[in-house]
Image: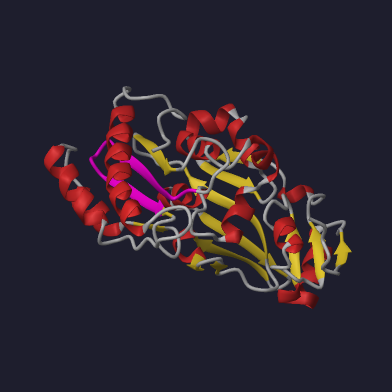
Amino acid sequence: MPITTEFEYVKPRDMDEALHVFSLYREKARALAGGTDLVVHLKENLARPEVVVDIKALQELAGFTLKGGILRLGALVTFSDLIDSPVIKAKFPLLWEASLTVASTGVRNRATVAGNICSAVPSADSAPVLAVYDAEVLARSIRGERRVPIADWFTGPKKTALQPDEIVTAVEMRLPAKKHAGCYMKLSRYEGEDLAQGGIAVLAFSDNTYRVAACALGPKPARCPRTEALLAGNKLGEKLLARARETILQEVSPISDIRSSKEYRLHMTQVMLGRALEKAVARLFGKGPKYGTENIA
């Protein structure tokens, strides 16, 4: 399908030039990084920008660093970059695991983490993982830079806290100081390129505290505070798991669509939560399946 929408194409030489374009065009400008969503939207006339700003040459947005326990992912970092990194696999295995579930190899080679959260679809695979790591999104405009907690980033389906004249420059998250392990469970119709029908990310800590977040089970990805509060301070067992499965139903509001019914999603939410908690705790004690395996429900 050809792109029939007319727009200006700009490839800025540096960040100052890019920010200047966004300050002029604001909501009429769209950033092009991986393009896995934007190009589709242009072809289907779902996006009609006046200017497309190609940011792929901006080196300050490339690569990632881990310094002082803080992981900084530049806005151009792709899911394949994360998968190929021994550092990510060793230090942030939950992020590595979730990256493996994103679409297909071809898409992962181009799709960026920043783009995934800027698209803000409820099924964004990176979102629940970033949520349990308490990530922050760094956004910059000619007015300066600001940090947006991931909890405040998603404001609705396909909507974010990003201002019209801003560009996401990076996503940062801190490596938890306490011993921990995690699991990302994705509900998918088949292995391969498919959007999540539901997703649950869990981080389990050595002090019996837990972080839980979901995607594709409500209008936006989000943490599950009631479930976390129920689990806090308790060792995982069948009675606690049963209560957690009931509690999480109070925190999700899935819909019925072409990929799944509401009722099926509700049932599988309980299944995914139970499996994710059990696998995370098993990994915490050096047991359970390896990261990247047995995480498709």
Which one is in front, 297 or 243?
Answer: 297
Which one is in front, 94 or 192?
Answer: 192
In the rendered view, tell whether residue 294 sits above or below residue 242.
above
Q: Which residues are magenta?
A: 196-214
User: Could one spot residue 42 in this view of the protein?
Assistant: yes
Magenta segment: does it hold 211? yes
User: Residue at position x 64%, y 35% from top?
Assistant: 105
- Determine whether, in the image, residue 116 is placed left or right of residue 233: right
- Determine whether, in the image, residue 248 is placed left or right of residue 74: left
Q: Residue 220's quadrant in the figure?
A: bottom left
User: Residue at position x 26%, y 57% from top?
Assistant: 249
**Residue 79 at x, y = what percent?**
61, 40
Which one is in front, 118 or 169?
Answer: 118
**Residue 61 at x, y = what percent?**
72, 50
- Determine whether, in the image, residue 254 is placed left or right of residue 169: left
Q: How is the image coloured?
A: secondary structure
Which one is in front, 67 or 125?
Answer: 125
Image quadrant where one finds the N terminus: bottom right
**Residue 18 at x, y = what percent?**
80, 63
Magenta segment: does it hold 269? no
User: Residue at position x 63%, y 63% from top?
Assistant: 139
In the rendered view, tell whether residue 73 sits above or below residue 19.
above
Q: Main secondary structure of the magenta part?
A: strand
Count of labels shown?
A: 0
User: In the image as oriented, which residue stretches furthest toward the left?
Assistant: 239
User: Could one spot residue 170 in this view of the protein?
Assistant: no
Image quadrant where one finds the C terminus: top left
**Residue 265 at x, y = what percent?**
35, 53
